[in-house]
Amino acid sequence: MKTKTLRKDIVNVITLGCSKNLVDSENLITQLKGNDFAVTHEDTTSDANVVIINTCGFIDLAKQESINTILEYAAKKSDGEIEKLYVTGCLSQRYKDALEEEIPEVDAYFGTLELPGLLAKLNADYKHELLGERLITTPQHYAFLKISEGCNRTCSFCAIPLMRGGHISRPIEELVAECKNLARHGVKEIMLIAQELTYYGLDLYKKRELARLLEALCDVEGIEWIRLHYAYPSKFPLEVLDVMAAQPKVCNYLDLPVQHANDEVLKRMKRQITQQETRELIEHARRIVPDISIRTTLIVGFPGETEEEFQDLCTFVQEMEFDRLGVFQYSHEEDTFAHQMEDDVPAPIKEARAARIMEIQKEISFDKNQGKIGKTFKVLIDKKEGDYFVGRTESDSPEVDNEVLLSAKENYARIGDFVHVRIDDANEFDLFATIVKN
């Protein structure tokens, strides 16, 4: 058992949930280090006496993971293994009162926008001069760039606005400055993230300015890839595709979460778009950027989803042939509009429908990957794992998309370098390649 000492606190930050949460944790770590704290990130072997858990409250599985993590560290505190425990993030924002009652071992709970208060609790100052000087926890060659906070959309299934508030864009000059700082520290790829990318600029500049932001970021020396995540399809700013086609730095990659394809389900979801409009947007994107890779996210088992509506979604997936696809089983979230509806699709049916969609996508992905055999691609090397160097093409984002595997016995590459490879073989989700001369 540890005993209280006069030594300076060592803080371990635990991050749960999405990349937006990761950026929040990185900003917290930057502030703590600016206050001369010793800080680790998700280091289970550290001698930390203070733990801060940055929680996710998006869907049931994520909420349960957050609660389990809080309980794990609450037990460590009770056993004297740590001295202080703080909780921040989405779950804390949404359920603070209930959490304080149910898990009183936590010293304090903070919401998503209460970083200054959390720092003050640790006797640390919020240093404005550190804005844009973010330290990253990802591999040194790539980083996420959060361009806005919150969301003004009204999707009936989503609790994000309850946890993150309304949309707030960050000024272009501030984002460029942060991007330059990341590039100075060796970052070569930035991934633009937000709750909703395409809304960017409406609050600050009174019009959608994602395209102008991209143009400004392309001027940053050292950045070679700029990738777009979470672009809402309704009222998508088409000029973004023109920038993608014209600017080599902007990856031919678009994360376009369509969520569903049946018009009646889309109405119940309050997605403000029809299947035909979605088809037209995808066709337009592929016409303007012929080599574009489109990733999407779907929800199955939404209240009232009939077998016929689900089959409509299956047909849509088969015909659209998305390059990348993820699927969620609907989660009934309190205080959302959809919570007024009956969660009437049984869990086994939700699970079966999710599996069916992924089977369709598996076949599509296999066929697309087979078509890459013999072709040459530019690849960014992320890591060495076992007998392979592992990298990604322009069509792939880290952790969620396909990987390129290079035999370490036959190839040599440095982590963080770009190399050109020839694809020798492929399966549903992996490409096997050999380095060729640049």
Image (spheres, rainbow, N blue to C red):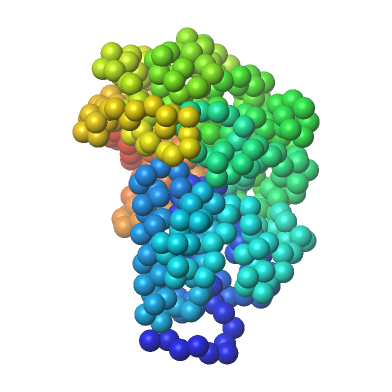
Q: Which of 218 and 138 is in front in this view?
A: 138
Residue visible at 46% across and 56% down in the picture: 98
The count of marks equals 0
Q: Where is residue 131 in the image (x, y as percent from the top left)?
A: 72, 56
Q: Residue at x 42, y 64 (%)?
A: 103
**Where is residue 423, by image quadrant?**
top left
**Which quadrant is the N terminus positioned in?**
bottom left
Q: Which of 397 and 111 is in front in this view?
A: 111
Residue drawn at x 60%, y 36% is 151
| 368 shown above or below 138 | above
> Of residues 247 and 314, which is closer to you in this image?
314
Image coords of residue 168 (percent x, y): 69, 39
Q: Is residue 392 visible?
A: no
Q: Is residue 27 visible?
A: yes
Image point 51% across, 22% down: which residue? 271
Percent of width and height locating residue 314: 31, 18
Q: Locate residue 320: give its quadrant.
A: top left
Direction from residue 171 to residue 347 in the image, left or right: left
Left or right placement of residue 400 versus residue 116 in this view: left
Question: Residue 398, how many percent across, how many down?
Answer: 46, 45
Q: Is residue 124 above or below residue 276?
A: below
